[in-house]
Image (cartoon, rainbow, N blue to C red):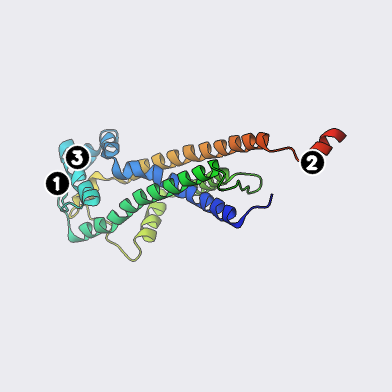
C-alpha cells in the first residue's frame, strides 16, 4: 500500500521530535529539580572547594533557581554578584523555560501520534524497513555519540562552544569569581556531572525507543494480511 503524504510528513516529524523529547527529558531534572544539585554538594566537595557552608550554598542556589523559574528578585544569598553576572542569568532563564516547553510540546505531539496510529487514522510508515520510533532513537544515539566523543576529547571546548552557540556575541558567561561569587559553587565538574546524567537518560530512552520499534514492527508483521504473492511463494516453496 502506497504511503499517503500526510503519513510520511507526520512520520518525519516523529523522527525529528524524538531527539527533542529525549534531550529535554534528560535536561529537565538538572535544570529544575533542586535535589539534583543538593545531592552533588558533598560528593563534589563544593563546601571545601568554595569556602562556603552547605547552608550558604543552598541559599544562593535557591535564590538563583527562584529567579529563573519564579521570576523572583535576583539574589545569590550572601554572595556578591555583578550586573554582568545578573545579565547572564537573564539570558539563561528563557533557555531553562524553553526546554520545559519543548518537553511538553514534543511529548504531547508524540502521544497524539501514538493515539492516531492506534485509531488507524494514521498509517504506518517505514524508513528502510524501520518504524519512525526506531529511526528517531538511532538518530538520537548518533547525535549523543558525536557530542560524547567531543566531550571526552575536550570538554572545556564543548562547554565554550555551547555558550558561543546559545549566547552569541555575549561574554558575560565568563564569571569573575570575586565579583560573581556564585560561580564558586557551580564548578565545571558539576556541569560535567549534569552532562553525564543527561547523556545517560538520552541513551536509555533511545535504546528503549529502538527496542519498542523493533517489537512493534514484529507485531505488525504478524498482523499483516496474507497477500496473493505471499501465498503463491508459500505454495511453491
Q: Position of residue 149 (x, y in %)?
A: 49, 47
Name the quadrant containing residue 216.
Answer: top right
Q: CA distance from mark 3 to mark 1?
A: 9 Å
Q: Which mark is residue 58?
A: 3
Q: Earlier in the sequence, mark 1 or mark 2?
A: 1
Query: Which residue is under mark 1?
Result: 77
Q: Residue furthest right?
A: 236
Check contact, mark 3 vs mark 1: CB within 8 A: no
SS of the residue at dot 3? helix
Q: Extreme bottom residue here?
A: 169
Q: Earlier in the sequence, mark 3 or mark 1?
A: 3
Determine the secondary structure under disc 2. helix
Name the side, left or right, on which 76 lies relative to 151: left
User: For mark 2, what is the residue?
Assistant: 228
Q: Nearer the viewer, residue 212 or 207?
A: 212
Residue 82, placed above or below residue 228: below
Q: Secondary structure at mark 1?
A: loop
**Image location (x, y in percent) of residue 90:** 24, 58
Across and down, in percent, residue 79 comes to 15, 48
State the residue in front, 197 or 217: 217
Q: How many residues crowd mark 3 within 10 Å: few (<14), some (14–19), many (20+)?
A: some
CA separation in Å, label 3 and label 2: 70 Å
Amino acid at each position: 500500500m502506497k504511503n499517503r503524504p500526510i503519513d510520511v510528513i507526520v512520520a518525519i516529524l516523529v523522527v525529528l521530535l524524538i531527539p527533542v523529547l529525549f534531550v529535554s527529558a534528560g535536561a529537565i531534572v538538572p535544570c529544575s529539580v533542586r535535589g539534583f544539585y543538593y545531592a552533588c554538594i558533598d560528593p563534589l566537595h563544593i563546601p571545601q572547594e568554595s569556602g562556603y557552608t552547605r547552608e550558604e550554598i543552598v541559599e544562593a542556589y535557591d535564590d538563583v533557581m527562584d529567579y529563573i523559574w519564579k521570576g523572583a528578585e535576583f539574589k545569590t544569598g550572601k554572595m556578591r554578584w555583578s550586573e554582568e553576572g545578573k545579565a547572564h542569568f537573564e539570558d539563561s532563564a528563557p533557555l531553562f523555560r524553553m526546554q520545559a516547553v519543548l518537553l511538553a510540546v514534543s511529548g504531547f505531539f508524540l502521544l497524539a501520534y501514538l493515539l492516531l496510529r492506534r485509531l488507524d487514522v494514521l498509517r504506518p510508515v517505514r524508513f528502510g524497513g524501520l518504524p519512525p520510533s526506531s529511526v528517531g532513537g538511532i538518530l538520537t544515539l548518533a547525535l549523543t555519540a558525536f557530542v560524547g566523543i567531543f566531550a571526552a576529547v575536550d570538554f572545556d571546548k564543548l562547554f565554550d562552544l555551547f555558550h558561543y552557540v546559545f549566547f552569541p556575541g555575549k561574554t558575560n558567561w565568563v564569571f569573575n569569581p570575586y565579583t560573581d561569587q556564585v560561580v564558586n559553587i557551580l564548578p565545571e565538574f558539576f556541569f560535567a556531572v549534569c552532562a553525564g546524567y543527561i547523556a545517560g537518560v538520552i541513551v536509555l530512552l533511545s535504546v528503549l525507543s529502538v527496542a519498542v520499534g523493533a517489537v512493534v514492527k514484529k507485531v505488525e508483521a504478524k498482523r499483516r494480511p496474507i497477500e496473493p504473492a505471499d501465498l503463491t511463494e508459500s505454495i511453491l516453496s
